[in-house]
Every structure is written in C-alpha cells, then in structure tokens.
Image (cartoon, helix red, strand yellow):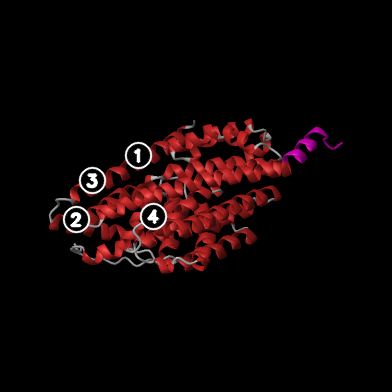
Amino acid sequence: MSKFRQMTAFRHAGLLSCVVLAIVLGVALGLFAPAPFVRGVNTVVALIGQFIKFMVPLIILGLVTPAIAETGRCAGKLLLVTVAIAYGSTLFAGFLGYFVSAAAFPSLVSSGAGQAVQDAAREFPPYVKLAIPPVMDVMTALAFSFVVGLGMVFTESDALKRVFSDFRSVVVRTISGVLVPLLPVFIFGIFLDMTAAGKAGRILKDFAAIIAVFSALTLVVIFLQYCAAGIVARKNPFRAMWTMLPAYMTALGTSSSAATIPVTRAQTLANGVSREITDFTIPLCATVHLAGSTVKIVSCSVALMLVAGHGSEICLSTFAGFIVMVGIVMIAAPGVPGGAVMSALGLIESVLGFDHAQIALMIALYLATDSIGTACNIAGDGAIAIVVDRFFGVSRRQEAACPEG
C-alpha cells in the first residue's frame, strides 16, 4: 500500500472516530449542560452551517467542472462503456434504495415524531446569527459546471483547464483542511442541542433502524450486480462474490476506495478478468462507481424526511431527479473523508429541502457508516470489470495474439 493510500485510510479511520466521539459527547453533555453553554455551542454550529452553505456551490464548481473536462479529453469506446455501466449501476442502486426505503421506513422509524418533539422542545437560540450568502445557488453552479466543462472539451482550452485545475486544488484543500475538521464540531453541537431539548433519544433509536435497512440493501445490491455479471459473462456469481470478499473486507476496515485498489485489483484478476481490463476498470470505477454511497444517501434521505414529518414530500418525481443528479455530482468527490456527502449536500438541501438539523444528521449518519457504502462500491467494481471484460477482453487478447503485419 502506497504512502498516500495509507494516509487516506488513516484519515478515514480518524474521522470516523471523531464523529462517533462527537455523538457520544453531545448526548452525554446535553443531559446536564446549562443553557448558556448550549447557546454558545449553537452559535458556533450556526456559523459552521453558514460556511458549509457558502462552500457547496464552490465545491460543485471546483470538482464537477474539471472532472467533466478531463473525462471528455480521454473519451473512448472502452471508457464510455465502462462509465455507462458504472452510472447505470449507481442509478439502479439509488432507485432500489428509494423504493425499499419508502416501503419499509414508515413502519420502522418514528414518522412525524421529530416534528412533534421539536414543537414541545426547549429552544437554545445562538447568541449571534451571521449570514454568509453563497455566490450562487446550487442549480446555477451545476449548470455552469456542465456548460464550462463541456466547453473545455470541445475548445481544448488548456489555459481554462489549468485555472479550474488550480481551483480544484483550492477546494480540495479547503475540504480536507477546514470543512472536514469542523464536521465533528458541527455534529457535536447538533446532538448537544437535540439532547438538551429532549429530542435525541428518539432520533438515536431511529438511527439503528436506518442503518440496518441500508446495510441490508448494500448486500442486495452486490448480489444483484454479480447475478447480472454472471449472466452476461457466464460465470458463477457466488464464486465471483466469494473471490471478491477480501476486497470487501478491506474496504470495510479502511473506508477508503483508494486504499483498497491493490486488493480489488488482485481479486479481480483472480476472477479471470484480463490484466488490461482490470488495470483500466478498477482505478476508474473507484472514482465513478458509487452504488453503495448512493443507496445509503437515498435511504437516509427518505428516513430523515419521515422523522421530520415530511412524509408527504417523499415522491418518485422528486427523488428521480435527485438520484440522477447525485450520481453525477458524487463522481467528482475528492479522495478525502466526507468528500461524497459534502458534494451531495447542495442537492440534499435544494432538491429535498433539508434544513440545518437534517443536514447535520445526514452527515453524521453517512460518516459514521462510511465503510458500508465504500465496501459496496468496491465489491461492485469487480462485477463491472467482469462485464467489461466479456465485451472487450476477448477482442483485445486476440489482437495481442495476432498483431498486424
């Protein structure tokens, strides 16, 4: 494992520990903390929330725009087919997560109870409210990113590409150096406030049901991916899944797609995929295939909307657009802890209408269970490699065996 991948894995593990500690401390201190202390922490949390809202459009501009430009520059048949299969897998997982969650969660979580408890809860308003308006709204940032990104593909403007490449470095450094360290403080403050107001007990109870459902969903997604790959490539799906188990377990332990690439590569080769296809698809899918992350975000979104008493707003028309867009936006997520959920926050807020507390709960749920989604992403990469090898691997091996001339 390279030094970079080791550092990535350590950062994921460190962030997970900080998030869990923040939740525990927030609940423990909220039981007896005086009101002035809670109001002081809420002041800090409100400022962090405003900064996150300010950064969301910049994150989209800095990550999505150069990602589109770079993908288009190296576009080829193999690339397009692999990306299309990966995106199709991500969409399938997202819609599966929506339908199962919409059917299961109304009977598992305290639907509408969050609003009822909030109405009777104590209030701890921040001492100071400071608004930091974003430079543009989320949908404007998305439209701008697609227009400029595709424009750079067709005009081949190297100068503009360098500008957005540098801007991406600034955004990634801001996420890793500022936003990510602030997330545990943000989560601590939210759970402190909920506990002091008498709302935390019911929320934590609902967390267990949410985690159980989307964890089971990720296993279903993996099973269906390998069944499809087995049908296409005429392989035993159960044997292929068993072969990929070391990669799955490594991802569970590291919460890092980058750190797991060497293991994923080795197990994909063990599944009979050609070396050329393996070396192409595994690093690429580690970035563009986000089935596990998508099913987790969609499931958590449905559950948190029910908890907040917004069950009537959980409709397919809203979530269809959300799933389609979030599958694209998260492709540009940087290789830092929390990158995927930070990239998706703009859509979670603008499309689903999440408020300050719901966003914090989403971040807490996502980061506390980061390894589950990552492991699903990684396991699915092996299935995609099998499918791609079925269509491209044989012809490439034949070309190598019968060179021209």
Disc 1 marks a residue whose amino acid type is Gly
Mark 4, residue position: 108
- What is the spatial separation of the Cα atoms under label 4 and label 2, in whole angstroms? 25 Å
**Label 1 crowd (10 A; few <14 / some 14-19 / many >=20):** few
Q: Is residue 235 magenta?
A: no
Q: What residue is shown at x 30% (from left), y 61% (from top)?
A: 114
Q: Secondary structure at mark 1?
A: helix
Residue 113: x and y, percent? 30, 62
| Residue placed most toward the observer, 348 or 230 | 230
Residue 182: x and y, percent? 31, 50
Q: Is residue 399 magenta?
A: yes
- What is the spatial separation of the Cα atoms under label 1 and label 2, in whole angstroms? 27 Å
* Image: magenta residue range: 393-405
Q: Which mark is residue 14?
A: 1
Mark 2, residue position: 196
- What is the spatial separation of the Cα atoms under label 1 and label 4, in whole angstroms? 31 Å
Disc 2 marks a residue whose amino acid type is Ala
Q: Secondary structure at mark 2?
A: helix
Query: Which label lies toward us, 4 or 2?
Result: 4
Query: Which label lies toward us, 4 or 3?
Result: 4
- Left or right of residue 373: residue 92: right
